Amino acid sequence: MGLLSAICTALLILSGCHAISGKSAKNQASGSWAEQMALAVMQRSDSLIRYNNPKSIKWQYDIAFLGQAIDRLGYLNPAYSAYMQSYMDYFISEDGKIKTYKLEDYNLDNINPGKNLITLYKRTASEKYHIALLQLIQQLTNQPRTLSGGFWHKKAYPWQMWLDGIYMSSPFMAQYAREFNDNKWFDTVFHQITLIYSKTLDPSTGLLYHAWDESKSQMWCNPETGTSRIFWSRGIGWFTMALVDVLDYVPENYQGRDSLIRIFRSVCTALLKVRDPEKMVWFQVVDQPGKTGNYAEASGSCMFTYAFAKGAKKGYLPQKFYREALKSFRGIVREFIITGIDGLPSLTHICGSCGLGGNPYRDGSYTYYVSEQQVDNDPKGVAPFILAAIELNQ
């Protein structure tokens, strides 16, 4: 048994975390849900590099996101923070180069791990983290943009903005602006958020379509508006999490701050209206819960629950949203948590991945969104589950 595995085993014993029995079972263990899930991750994989058996090891937004979530528990035991750092250190050389990262791809997904670099630089003062994160700043400085100034999601997806990209880049930019006194990035954050909101908003529901193609040339888009055609749970989840996290760093006197809060409140209000009233969670296509093929989806549900809870605690949302977040968290446990074959808690019904265009071509249809593979314990679900549990003290 490796050192980290031994630490994890000891943590399991000390926290009193026991396996969850059955889909409807309630948490009776003395350890919090946040700890139970973090420890399950650490027990299943002694390093995030090998989490969920990736086909290839690369600088990856979702694995880094999971590391960030587990690191939030570092105040309870340094092993949690060490777990995140060991993943980041695999990629960061002593001279600050990032293994497998290609700036020239101009892929916004590659920015998200930068939040961990800022955390580690503040924590250790090691210059390698600073040098590495400056490479991400260089990418953002030269990121291709739409004619209206919006970041392309990737160089490979010209003229397209995706909701995903707001989470991948904006919280990092806002944190960098605050930590390094580079305030121009606040304006960039504000522009990216307000632009994509205006382009993807459906005024009749208050919900957001997954993406927008400024060129209106993609087969997946509405030829008149350029928007995609589906309200995808996790896409809107990325956006809501981005807003509530960005507000941690945007100064109180910033002229656009109130606008960001209004957008956040509007989207959350719209989301509450489409939550399943019995399950208390959200479906993969959020506005069509009863349609054939649609299913209750874990990652979006966890993201919304996190955003509701944090937003209410920070005062951006009415306090009722905290109570609603608690209801949704209980729904998440009831609907999605099972005992894995290893005896540890597993989070199920997570959409593995959804995108638009590419090869083979993803047409953005309803059938496409509900037919993508579901993956147990995917980091895109486990990370927001942990964050939601932390916000709700669960």
Image: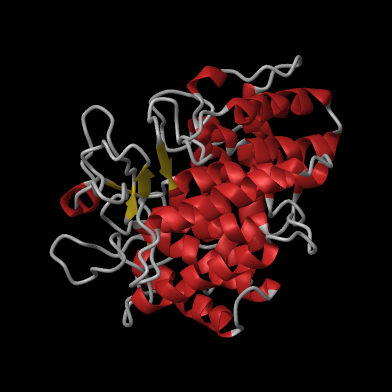
Q: Position of residue 115 (x, y in %)?
A: 67, 41
Please tell me which residue lies in front, 121 or 240: 240
Q: Position of residue 227 (x, y in %)?
A: 32, 50
Please tell me which residue lies in front, 121 or 363: 363
The image quadrant of residue 85 is: top right
> Residue at the spot x=56%, y=85% of the render?
320
Instruction: Report the colour scheme.
Output: secondary structure
16 relative position to 289: left or right: right
Please tell me which residue lies in front, 194 or 240: 194
> Residue at the spot x=47%, y=68% of the render?
267
228 relative position to 30: left or right: left
Q: Position of residue 48 (x, y in %)?
A: 55, 35
| Residue extending furthest toward the top | 95
- Vertical side of 246 occupied by 333: above or below: below
The answer to whether one can see residue 42 in this image is no
Query: Tag count in the figure?
Result: 0
89 relative position to 223: left or right: right
The image quadrant of residue 394 is: bottom right
| Residue extending furthest toward the left | 292
> Residue at the spot x=34%, y=74% of the render?
274
- Vertical side of 290 occupied by 1: above or below: above
| Residue extending furthest toward the right | 125
The image quadrant of residue 206 is: bottom left
- Vertical side of 131 occupied by 53: above or below: below
Q: Position of residue 302 (x, y in %)?
A: 47, 62
- What quarter of the picture does the N terminus occupy? top right
The answer to whether one can see residue 95 in this image is yes
